[in-house]
Image: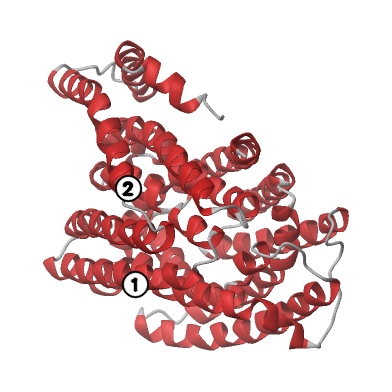
């Protein structure tokens, strides 16, 4: 089982690696083409787009992945339902943009909403094609689609930028990406066991997945407010420019999370669904140990070198991002581990527990986000976010182990403590050397290269055996 699981994970991670590298390269160009205020406009819309996209899925994807077999009637019913749902949500979102005109005191939001509304429809319609490819672990295929969509969108952005269209180009990019991605995924789903989805307006077949999807959907709702309230409040009560800076720092912090954890999640549920609880627990603890071993050095490197990383990727106009990245890097290991928990709730067919634990965690996060905004700066928001994620981590894993795994979480925390203890010499020495002795060559790239080489050397001296045993063992 481990070999099958990690084979699937490797496909997903390596497939997404190329996608994220391309996105980072694109972002390097975009950060120099557009100002923090312009990115703030996109972020202020995107935070609400994410909310409406929750309704475009309704938890159907994990529900379909939990089924051993999907009949043609169910496939076609879900596909048709997503078309109808997408059109309805698209119209509602467009109407909502007139509220954004008032909320952000900018009459252009309804114009931007035209592009986003169509993109929402197309995003909704990708549910069945994406599930079809995920069920057969065709992650390289999905990655290839995303890469091609990103490249073509990037070419259009560069072309339109020369005509001085302004920030609307970024909204055109979102729409174009969605168009290309949908049609490619739909065509490629023909080569899966599910085949091409067709129209079927008999929605009675949806009852097979609605109970599972309903709890998943409720979790997505509470999780949305937990993860996005900071953006909503910062854009309104601090400034759009502050939102652009905060969003960019959070995005940079999430890149390793997206590459590793978000690549792993789609591989877990199709492989572990239906397996015995004891086996799932064993695979969970192995995976968590691997994630910790990978994430701690990443967090350490980003936290220490945040200013140089920001300067290299985004340029001097984003210099304020460095401080926030340094703070948010603290929660990279927490988020990396925490983000896999949902897949294990789903594998055990316990979406109700996922919702209950998520609701408590959301309440914690919302409380601390409001506190951070009330204190008056994006730095205080970032600090409060670190505290809230730490508390949410404890809550969610208490529920997972006590009520889903039905065992004590002592071994789980033992893994965490053991890993951090083994990394202690590297953390202390690396932090002391970089902060106390100047490694600056006045060339940002070489500064980062030198710092990264030092970290790798310390890892080789103190933790090479642990890295080999943990990361290479898939038995």
* Residue 43 vertical placement versus 264 (above, below): below
Disc 1 crowd rating (10 Å Cα; few below 14, some 14-19, many 20+) is: some
Nearer to me, 321 or 375: 375
Q: Residue at x 63, y 34 (%)?
A: 3
Where residue 252 sits in the image (x, y, percent)? 40, 45
Q: Is residue 318 visible?
A: no
Q: Residue at x 16, y 69 (%)?
A: 371
* Residue 375 vertical placement versus 284 (above, below): below
Quadrant of the rendered image containing residue 468: top left
* Residue 116 vertical placement versus 399 (above, below): below
Q: Is residue 103 visible?
A: yes
Quadrant of the rendered image containing residue 15: top right
Mark number displayed over residue 232: 1
Mark number displayed over residue 334: 2
In the visual, does 147 lie left or right of 247?
A: right
* Residue 111 vertical placement versus 424 (above, below): below
- Point out the tag, 1 or 2, that comes first from the N-terminus: 1
In the visual, does 84 lie left or right of 72?
A: left
Nearer to me, 265 or 452: 265
Quadrant of the rendered image containing residue 224: bottom left
């Amino acid at each position: 089982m481990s070999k099958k699981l990690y084979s699937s994970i490797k496909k997903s991670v390596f497939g997404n690696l190329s996608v994220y590298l391309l996105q980072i390269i694109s972002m390097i160009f975009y950060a120099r083409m557009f100002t923090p205020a312009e990115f703030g406009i996109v972020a202020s819309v995107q935070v609400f787009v994410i909310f409406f996209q929750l309704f475009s899925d309704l938890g159907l994807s994990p529900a379909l992945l939990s089924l051993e077999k999907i009949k043609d009637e169910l496939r076609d019913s879900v596909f048709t339902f997503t078309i109808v749902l997408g059109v309805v949500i698209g119209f509602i979102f467009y109407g909502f943009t007139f509220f954004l005109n008032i909320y952000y005191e900018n009459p252009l939001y309804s114009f931007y909403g035209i592009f986003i509304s169509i993109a929402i429809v197309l995003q909704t319609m990708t549910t069945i094609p994406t599930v079809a490819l995920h069920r057969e672990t065709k992650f390289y295929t999905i990655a290839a689609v995303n890469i091609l969509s990103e490249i073509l969108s990037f070419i259009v952005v560069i072309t339109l930028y020369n005509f001085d269209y302004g920030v609307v180009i970024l909204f055109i990019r979102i729409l174009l990406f969605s168009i290309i991605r949908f049609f490619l995924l739909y065509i490629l789903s023909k080569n899966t066991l599910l085949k091409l989805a067709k129209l079927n307006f008999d929605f009675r077949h949806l009852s097979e997945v609605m109970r599972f999807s309903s709890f998943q959907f409720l979790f997505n709702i509470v999780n949305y407010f937990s993860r996005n309230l900071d953006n909503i409040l910062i854009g309104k009560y601090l400034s759009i420019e502050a939102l652009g800076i905060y969003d960019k720092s959070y995005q940079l912090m999430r890149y390793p999370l997206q590459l590793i954890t978000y690549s792993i999640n789609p591989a877990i549920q199709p492989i572990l669904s239906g397996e015995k609880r004891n086996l799932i627990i064993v695979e969970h603890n192995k995976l968590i140990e691997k994630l910790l071993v990978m994430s701690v050095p990443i967090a350490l490197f980003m936290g220490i070198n945040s200013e140089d990383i920001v300067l290299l990727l985004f340029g001097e106009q984003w210099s304020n991002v460095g401080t926030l990245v340094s703070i948010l890097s603290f929660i990279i290991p927490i988020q990396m581990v925490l983000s896999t928990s949902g897949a294990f709730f789903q594998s055990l067919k316990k979406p109700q527990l996922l919702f209950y634990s998520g609701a408590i965690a959301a309440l914690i996060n919302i409380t601390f986000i409001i506190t951070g905004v009330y204190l008056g700066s994006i730095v205080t928001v970032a600090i409060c976010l670190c505290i809230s994620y730490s508390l949410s981590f404890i809550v969610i894993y208490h529920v997972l182990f006590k009520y889903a795994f039905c065992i004590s979480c002592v071994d789980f925390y033992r893994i965490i403590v053991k890993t951090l203890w083994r990394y202690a010499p590297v953390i202390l020495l690396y932090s002391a050397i970089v902060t106390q002795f100047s490694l600056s060559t006045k060339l940002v790239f070489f500064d980062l290269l030198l710092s990264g080489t030092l970290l790798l050397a310390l890892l080789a001296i103190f933790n090479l055996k642990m890295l080999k045993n943990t990361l290479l063992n898939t038995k």
